Image: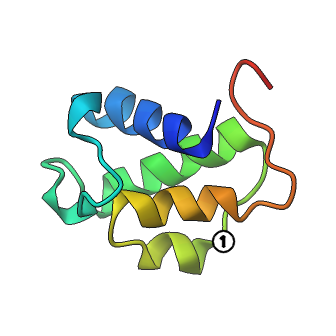
Amino acid sequence: MSASELVRDVLSQLLDVDEQQLEPELALAAIEDWDSVNALRVLMFLEREVGAPLDFEAYSASQTLGDLIAVIDQLPSATYGPSA
């Protein structure tokens, strides 16, 4: 599973967002239920899925879905998802 697929899957599951809407240029603030509480839920879920802590500063600074995907891609040896 790629970082893009993982982030889309997590947002779809946790925030009930249609995966078709989740394009890299989508502003996180444009997601209806994106708030500080859900941002932390997503962070914790992503960290559990990748099995490593994410760079919190980079995660917090993420403005778009693409930024969020890049945070996952920065992991040194990311292994995540059921196929990992």
**Quick one: 5 or 48, which is closer to the camera?**
5
Left or right: residue 84 versus residue 43 is right
For label 1, the SS is loop
Left or right: residue 7 versus residue 63 is right
Find residue 18 and report its image quarter.
Answer: top left
Residue wearing tag 1: 55
> Residue at 80% of width from left, 39% of height from top?
79
Residue 32, above or below 61: above
> Residue at 12% of width from left, 48% of height from top?
32
Find residue 27 and report its image quarter.
Answer: bottom left
Q: Quadrant of the C terminus?
A: top right
Please say which color scheme the image uses: rainbow
Q: Residue furthest right?
A: 77
Q: Residue furthest top?
A: 82
> Residue at 71% of width from left, 19% of height from top?
82
Residue 78, above or below 28: above
Residue 70, above or below 5: below
Give x and y (percent) for residue 64.
33, 65
Give x and y (percent) for residue 74.
71, 65
> Residue at 37% of width from left, 57% of height from top?
65
Give x and y (percent) for residue 4.
51, 43
Residue 65 in sight in this render = yes
Q: Amino acid at mark 1?
A: Asp
Q: Quadrant of the N terminus?
A: top right
Give x and y (percent) for residue 6.
54, 36
Left or right: residue 12 versus residue 71 is left
Residue 17 in sight in this render = no
The total of numbered circles placed on residues is 1
Residues packed near mark 1 inside 10 Å, few (<14), some (14 to 19) or many (20 plus): some
Left or right: residue 62 versus residue 6 is left
Find residue 37 and report its image quarter.
Answer: bottom left
